[in-house]
Every structure is written in C-alpha cells, then in structure tokens.
Image (cartoon, grey):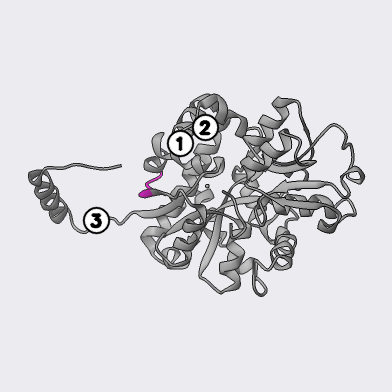
Amino acid sequence: MRFFQHHRILRSSIATVLALCAALSAAGPAHAEVKVGLSDWPGWVAWYVADQKGFFKRHGANVKLVWFGNYTDSVAALSAGQLDANAQTWSDTMTPLAKKVDVKAVLVNDNSAGNDALMVGPKIKSFADLKGRTVALEQFSISHFVLATALARNGMSMNDVKVVNLSAGDAAAAFVAGRVDAAVVWNPWVNKIQASGKGHALFTSRDMPGLVPDLLVAHGKSLRDKIKRQDLVGMIQAWFDTQAFIHDHPDEAVQIMSKVVGIKPAEYKVFLPGTRFFDRADNQAALDASKPQSLVAAGPEIHKFLSTNKLVAGPVDYAAGIDASLLADALKK
C-alpha cells in the first residue's frame, strides 16, 4: 500500500434486459459514467461515503468507483487511459508526468498528518541516539520517504542508519519483538506499537506538512470531454460534502469506510486523527502554485527523493501536472 512506484454483481432476466434496452433507446444515448480508481487509504475510501450518502447524485455526478486491491495497478490503469480518474499520491503522479503522460491532479483529498511515523524504543530519545541503529521499513514506500525526510531535517542521512527492508506489518512485528531498534510504519501499526507500550513516535508525517498529499488525478482525455468534465466537477463538490460529513458524523462515516475494507469500525477509527481531510480552503491553497503549502511547492523535495532512489527519470513540470480549473468551477456553484 501507498508506494512511490510502490492499497458486485447484477442479475437480470432476459426480459428485464430487453425492456431496459428499449427504454434506453427511447431515451436517447446513455450518459457515460466516469470511472474512478480507488484503493485502500482513508482519504480515498471516503469516496464510498459520497456514494452511499447520495452526494454524487446531489451534484449530478455520474461516477463509477472501481476498487483496486493493488494500488500500483490503479496508477498504471490511469496512465493507460483505462480510467477517467484515479486516487493516487502526488509522488506516484510524478513518474507519469516525467514521461509526459497526460494526467492532471484536480483535487487533494487529504494529507497524512500522523498516520505515518518513525517509531523508536524508550532508549532512543533523539535523532543522535538513532545513529548506527537498525530501522525496519518498506523500501521505496512512503515510510522510506518519511525516514529520509526526518533524517535530513535533523542533520543526518540514510547512511547514518541501517535499513532493514520489511513490509509494514513485518516491520512493526520486528520492532515489538526487539529485533530492530526502530520502524517506520503507517496506521494501524503506529497505533498498535503505541498501545503495546514498546515504542513512541520520534517523527511523524505531521512534522512534514504538505509532503504526503493524496489526490484525485484525472486523465487529460476525460478533462477534454465536456460531459465527463462536468461529472468530475460534481465529484469535487461531492467531496466537500463528504469532508463535512466525516467531520460532523465520524462514527457513521467510519461504519461505511470500515465495511469497504473489511475491518471493525473501532480499528478503522484510529486512521481519522492522522488523516487531514482537505476542505475548500485547503484545496485552494494546495492547487495555487504561489502558496507555500501548494503541490508545486512540495514538488522539488518529493522529486529529490524519487530521483535519488532512481524512481523517476527526468524532470517534472509540477504546475503542468495540475488543473485547478475544475476546483474553480466547483466553487462557483
């Protein structure tokens, strides 16, 4: 889940199908839905709240949510034009942009604000204490980026620690068992480590605001389709209803979201405090290149990590990878 290049069946009788076809024929051509890829992250699972609470319908958005068990498959599907839009990170949008793939970020769903963390034991009280220690994490994932950023901001580099490449769950288990000195993981493992009493956070994604943005990214051909563009504008309007609903009715939102990913509501609720769901003002700032908290401003630091680890080839025109006009249209209504 969450890598830098790294997370229903209808039955009809023949008669019903024939009747439906006749009705559609009489009504004229059908309005093609926009297909939007989703995977397992709270800011993206939240789209199911929009769907189930009728927010898409409220804003006239004809949206089909397409679930991907493998996040990277969704990124590839958007790049290939098999989706109209996809839920993906800013970092994972840079590789297609470097290859001149026609995709644009149109909305920021959220920023990780504590859901990703460098967890250490009681003996490690500062970054100086971390020098020479073993740190378990998923290589080239968000966790890798969090550690690289944390070290750089404290006058250190990746060379100052010994990285052990493990999946997030295995990294957490290795840390709790005392096999490594530290681990960089995301929730629910952050919460589980804290609850075990074995470790605390030395640095979290809350300490690097704007650097872990989760987005809605659209394909250029869909943006040039007038009907699909209007659906995407309606989808953005539905997002703001969704963000407000999660804020005002967190328990009901968690009931919907936890069911999608198949875990208990109480377990899923730990994600909410560490996810900063973006409202209208947050999005205006994020999509405005002149603002210090914008995607454009965050671009170089993210790109540096990707480039250093050979995860992106060539430069990225950050501003060209953003289309703020849909947000502007959504805010007019």
Indicate the amino acid at tag 1: Val
Q: Give the number of the disc on residue 99.
A: none
Residue 39 vertical position relative to residue 254 in the rendered view, above or below: below
Secondary structure, magenta segment, majority class? loop
For the residues marked 3 and 2, what is the alpha-carbon distance in whole angstroms?
31 Å
Q: Nearer the viewer, residue 212 or 229?
A: 212
Q: Earlier in the sequence, mark 3 or mark 2?
A: 3
Determine whether label 3 and label 2 are within 8 Å by CB: no
Q: Amino acid at mark 2?
A: Phe
The disc at residue 30 is 3
At which x and y percent is residue 165?
A: 68, 52
Look at the picture and state if 152 lies above or below 238.
Answer: below
Which residue is label 2 attached to?
A: 245
Does the CB distance between marks 2 and 1 fall below 8 Å? yes
Question: Looking at numbered disc 3 in the image, what kind of residue is underneath it?
Answer: Ala
Q: Earlier in the sequence, mark 2 or mark 1?
A: 1
Nearer the viewer's eye, disc 2 or disc 1?
Answer: 1
Residue range in magenta is: 59-64
Give the left or right position of residue 172, taking residue 56 as reference. Answer: right
Location of residue 50 in the rendering, given as x and y in whole percent from the top left corner: 44, 39
* Residue 184 falls inside the magenta stretch: no
Badge 1 local density, few (<14 within 10 Å), some, or many (20+)?
many
Residue 62 covered by magenta stretch: yes
